[in-house]
Image (cartoon, helix red, strand yellow):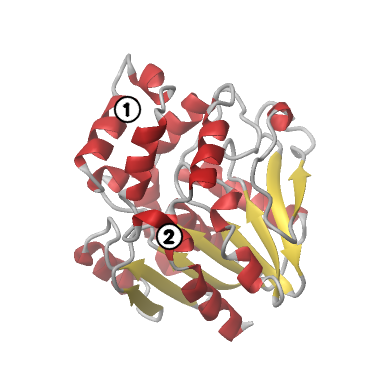
């Protein structure tokens, strides 16, 4: 796997790292996927945010691994999953990576937990695979116009540069640490929740050959994530929507999703931003452990 020359700098106690090879007959069309595994119990699949990776859940995994077998996936092309030149990073392609994990490992009775982009994928995967999914916890769904560009003026400038024709691929490959820190802190109520070693890990992943193209494609995928809202009403499993009060979504965005999922439980956390797994992992853990 091309990512093997770079090793993660963060180890989450109790986890082991695994890979899923491309399916037979699909080399060059789908890449190797990397995931972390920990714990015992019913399967719990964790799906990370835009521009992050499985280690995003470093504080959540130890809180739930005594009640669940946890699988934290690096979405296609992200983290240490393989970068396939020319691959799509629209919602259906990323969802296909999640569904590979569930079907290749033959997981049933699955609790899907996603944050941001991962929350959208948790919901659409549940719509596709109702026979495998027990429950969905969707944290700060990333399915609204503007996305991360809503977080700050700096984020709007950075994302606008990444998406710009011509210069976009060049801008996507330039990630000054101070800029990445400020953009990510725009998704936090408590800025100190972004730990320096995690920021360094994200920057290391960003240095992988081909990663700037992945990052640009993921930002370009926002319309497909918004369009995926049309699938929410197909979800048969129980859903819990969780939002941070200071998330980038607006109250009208949250209300619209409540209308699409009228039976869903709803929790809003005061003073918390977009990255709840970094700020308040114990809240998500309590929701999960109560239902284990």
Residue 129 vs 11, above or below: the answer is below
Name the spot of residue 270 as percent of width and height, x first: 29, 73
Residue 133 appearing in the image: no
For residue 40, side relative to residue 72 (left or right)? right
Name the spot of residue 87 as percent of width and height, x first: 56, 29
Q: Label 1 belongs to which residue?
A: 163
Frontmost residue, 199 versus 119: 199
Residue 289 vs 111, above or below: the answer is below
User: Image quarter for residue 148?
Assistant: top left
Residue at horizontal 29 percent and vertical 31 percent from the top: 158
Frontmost residue, 245 versus 11: 11
Residue at horizontal 22 percent and vertical 61 percent from the top: 250
Name the spot of residue 150 as percent of width and height, x first: 23, 47
Q: Label 2 belongs to which residue?
A: 231
Label 1 secondary element: helix
Name the spot of residue 203 as percent of width and height, x first: 51, 34
Residue 177 vs 14, above or below: the answer is above
Label 1 crowd bin: few (<14), some (14–19), many (20+), radius 10 Å: some
Residue at horizontal 63 percent and vertical 51 percent from the top: 73
| Residue at far top of view | 166
Label 2 secondary element: helix
Frontmost residue, 216 versus 222: 216
The residue mark sitting in front, 1 or 2, is 1
Say which mark, if any, is on residue 112.
none
Label 2 crowd bin: few (<14), some (14–19), many (20+), radius 10 Å: some
Distance between the alpha carbons at the discs numbered 1 and 2: 26 Å
* Placement of the C terminus among the 4 image quadrants: bottom right
């Amino acid at each position: 796997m091309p990512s093997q020359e770079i090793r993660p700098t963060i180890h989450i106690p109790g986890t082991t790292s695994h890979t899923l090879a491309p399916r037979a007959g699909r080399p060059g069309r789908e890449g190797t996927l990397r995931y972390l595994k920990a714990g015992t119990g019913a399967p719990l699949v964790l799906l990370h945010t835009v521009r992050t990776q499985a280690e995003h859940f470093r504080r959540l995994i130890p809180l739930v691994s005594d009640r669940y077998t946890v699988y934290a996936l690096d979405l296609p092309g992200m983290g240490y999953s393989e970068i396939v030149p020319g691959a799509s990073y629209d919602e259906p392609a990323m969802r296909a990576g999640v569904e590979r994990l569930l079907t290749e490992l033959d997981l049933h009775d699955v609790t899907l937990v996603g944050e941001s982009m991962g929350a959208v994928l948790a919901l659409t995967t549940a719509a596709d695979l109702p026979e495998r999914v027990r429950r969905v916890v969707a944290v700060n769904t990333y399915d609204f116009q503007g996305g991360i560009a809503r977080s700050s003026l700096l984020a709007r400038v950075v994302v606008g540069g990444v998406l710009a024709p011509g210069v976009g691929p060049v801008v996507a490959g330039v990630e000054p640490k101070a800029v990445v820190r400020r953009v990510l802190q725009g998704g936090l109520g408590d800025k100190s929740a972004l730990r320096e070693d995690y920021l360094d890990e994200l920057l290391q992943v960003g240095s992988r050959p081909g990663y700037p193209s992945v990052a640009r494609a993921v930002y370009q995928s926002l319309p497909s994530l918004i369009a995926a809202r049309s699938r929410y009403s197909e979800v048969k499993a129980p859903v819990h929507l969780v939002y941070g009060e200071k998330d980038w979504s607006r109250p009208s965005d949250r209300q619209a999703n409540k209308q699409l999922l009228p039976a869903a439980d709803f929790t809003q956390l005061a003073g918390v931003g977009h990255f709840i797994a970094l700020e308040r992992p114990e809240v998500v853990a309590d929701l999960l452990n109560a239902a284990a």
